[in-house]
Image (tube, rainbow, N blue to C red):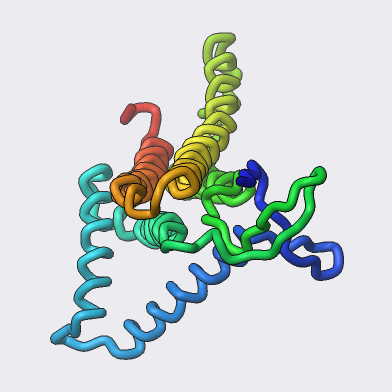
Amino acid sequence: MHISLAAEKIIEIGPVAITNTMIVSWVVILLLSTISILVFRNLKEVPGKLQNFWEFIIEAILGMIENVTADRKKAEKMLPLVATFFIFIITANWIGLIPGFETIGRWEVLEGEKVLIPYLRPPAADLNTTLALAIISVVAIQIFGFGYLGFKYIKKFINFKGPIQFFVGILEIISEFAKIISFSFRLFGNIFAGAVLLAVISFLIPAIAALPFYGLELFVGFVQALVFAMLTTVFIYVATQSHEEH
């Protein structure tokens, strides 16, 4: 059985290497974009099942954000980013749980051993994907903070009023970079570990024995999407508060 920490390269287009996680990411984006187009092209006052389902999800996410911010207008501004994170991550996590998902691929010889290189792999099981999501989240946090507080937001990081304030500013800068590491490794670690667990269980014992673990990974995939979205919400909310409000 072959387990690779890094995403496997499937093809190359010029200097760009296309990995199995990139392919699944594009599939998820195409799937969600198609559903969005179908829903918003046919909006009705009396919603159908599909429209009703998506309205329920969006209202639930908006309610979660509003519980954190206690501000409807601010919650509505944060909604597109937070909802995109949640819906993309949970879809990417769950699509990787389709039975046989990582069994379609090609055989290659690596280090003298014949191994299967899967064409499909959960996007969050690639550190590059989770790192990209983390960077987008942290950059968005800074944009929201600057948008609400203006140049006062810069004082959070650069403050020459005294040695203590200056040192606190340095710590704030370090904490922003720490968020990137925390965001990316938490999501990657949980999803990659789940993928390895399912692969090992399915390899060692009959497929039916892995069913309880599929239920566990469904829950983990949901929780990790929720945690990423919730932490982004909280960090944006904190960034938009002035020092007097802390």
Q: Nearer the viewer, residue 93 or 176?
A: 93
Name the residue at 41% across, 44% down.
228
Q: Quadrant of the C terminus?
A: top left
Q: Nearer the viewer, residue 121 or 42?
A: 121
Name the residue at 71% across, 61% down.
107
Image x and y of residue 114, in percent: 73, 52
Image x and y of residue 174, in percent: 59, 25
129 relative to 112 in the view: left or right = left
User: Against 86, is 155 above or below?
Assistant: above
Name the residue at 53% across, 27% down.
175
- Within the image, what quadrant is residue 237 found in? top left
- Within the image, what quadrant is residue 103 found in? bottom right
Q: Nearer the viewer, residue 100 or 166?
A: 100
Q: Nearer the viewer, residue 103 or 180?
A: 103
Residue at the extreme left of the image, as rendered: 46
14 relative to 215 in the view: left or right = right
Residue 82 visible in the displayed image: no
154 relative to 79 in the view: left or right = right
